[in-house]
Image: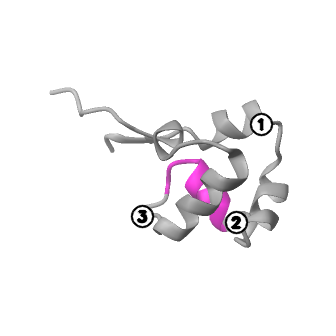
Amino acid sequence: MPIIVNLDVMMAKRKISLGELAERIELTPANLSILKTGKAKAIRFSTLEAICRELNCQPGDILEYQPDEE
């Protein structure tokens, strides 16, 4: 998939655990883990907004587009 999720990088930069972030944004750790590992098929804007608010970052810091190589 050409969308890369860099949530783990931002969490490491902010020194926050998966459990702590999940609690702050009111999401289950399992669902946040699915997003973090890039296995999610979609993300709600409200979830993205909450993540950006808690990590003090922009959506582009978390999501990256890399076209498939042909």
Question: What colour-coding does the image apply?
Answer: one colour
Residue with the most extreme top position = 69
Q: Which one is in front in this view, the residue at disc 2 or the one at disc 1?
A: 1
Give the Cα distance between marks 3 and 2.
15 Å
Residue type at mark 1 is Arg
Task: Give the residues in magenta.
Answer: 31-39
For label 3, the SS is: loop
Which mark is drawn over residue 42? 3
- Magenta stretch encompasses residue 41: no
> Measured along the vertical axis of the image, is residue 19 above or below residue 36?
below
In which quadrant is the C terminus drawn? top left
Residue at screen point 84% across, 57% down: 20
Q: Quadrant of residue 65?
A: top left
Q: Residues within 10 Å of mark 2 (few under 14, many from 20)?
A: few
Which mark is drawn over residue 30? 2
Q: Which one is in front in this view, the residue at disc 3 or the one at disc 2?
A: 3
- Magenta stretch encompasses residue 37: yes
Q: Are marks 3 and 2 in contact (CB under 8 Å)?
A: no
Q: Quadrant of residue 11?
A: top right
Q: Are marks 1 and 3 in contact (CB under 8 Å)?
A: no
User: In the figure, is residue 34 to the left or right of 23?
Assistant: left
Percent x, y for residue 39?
A: 50, 55
Q: Quadrant of residue 66?
A: top left
Percent x, y for residue 27?
A: 70, 71
